[in-house]
Image (tube, grey):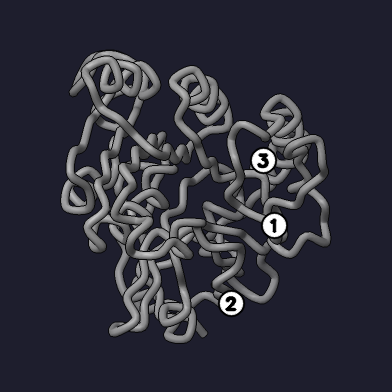
Amino acid sequence: MFEIVTKKMLTPTICEMDVKAERLARAAQPGQFLIVRADEKGERIPLTISDYDAEKGTVTIVTQKIGASSADIISYEVGESFADVVGPLGIPSDFVEMSPDELSRQHYVFIAGGVGTAPVYPQAKWLHERGVKVDVIIGARNKDLFIYTDKMATACDNLYLCTDDGSAGFHGVGTAMLEKLVAEGKQYTRCVAIGPMIMMKFATLTAKKLNIPITVSLNTLMVDGTGMCGACRVSVGGKTRFACVEGPEFDGYLVDFDEAMRRQRMYLEEEKEANESHVCRIGRGK
């Protein structure tokens, strides 16, 4: 059993939990994910690892309440335990394999959107701890939807906040902020974008225009996290790839985002039905 050590609601619909998982915490690397199964009847939910602490033996997950299964996960409280937490899964971020000399020549810029801000944090922190130059751009519709801003400020050289409505930071989207920074003289060697699929698509188009290599995370496509269900199939460079076993990170230039967004919409009716018939775990006598 995997005990919940801490729980914090970052927004009314986004929850952060530290979960006891000692072996996973010792093995985790930036860019990887895990699978949570709340109880013996629960659905397998892939979640990107938002942080890990080998000394404490904990991993951090950030869950957004979207459907019935994510609502179940968020309903758990400190002291309760999940039936399964499996991982680390997926291929770590490519910079993990870079030599110290190669890392010293890099200047990374991350573009984070929505709940995608959480998985950016361990990547930025890993690089920042090794002396790599790191800038982070976080975008949200308004200032009340930001998460992880305090944590992120300690994990990068420069943090830029952007809001669609101008309520905080730069008035505009993250890609516009990236263009502004480059126009002002910033020279980035690599961009990483994590967030809604449409955001990653336009981040890729912007990075390509600016001649910056870009990596995107396709964790939002995953369902069972093993490749068996096939739900995470995506075309990358004209070839079919599986996000959960060959990713979740890919070269953004090569991803067919239109196909990926169509795949995301495949189960909307089923999810709607699940939400309408959902009974909370308290109501089931758990």
Q: Are marks 3 and 2 in contact (CB under 8 Å)?
A: no
Discs 3/1, front: 1
Q: Are marks 3 and 1 in contact (CB under 8 Å)?
A: no
Which mark, residue 114? none
From what the image shows, is residue 88 above or below residue 216? below
> Which residue is rendered at x = 25% and y = 14% of the image?
171
Discs 3/2, front: 2
Mark 2 element type = strand
> Closer to the N terminus: mark 3 or mark 2?
2
Residue under pointer 1? 246
The amino acid beneath tag 1 is: Glu
Give the Cα separation between the discs numbered 3 and 1.
34 Å
From what the image shows, is residue 220 above or below residue 92? above
Residue 116: percent from the left, percent from the top? 44, 43
Discs 2/1, front: 1
The amino acid beneath tag 2 is: Asp
Residue under pointer 2? 84
Which mark, residue 276? 3
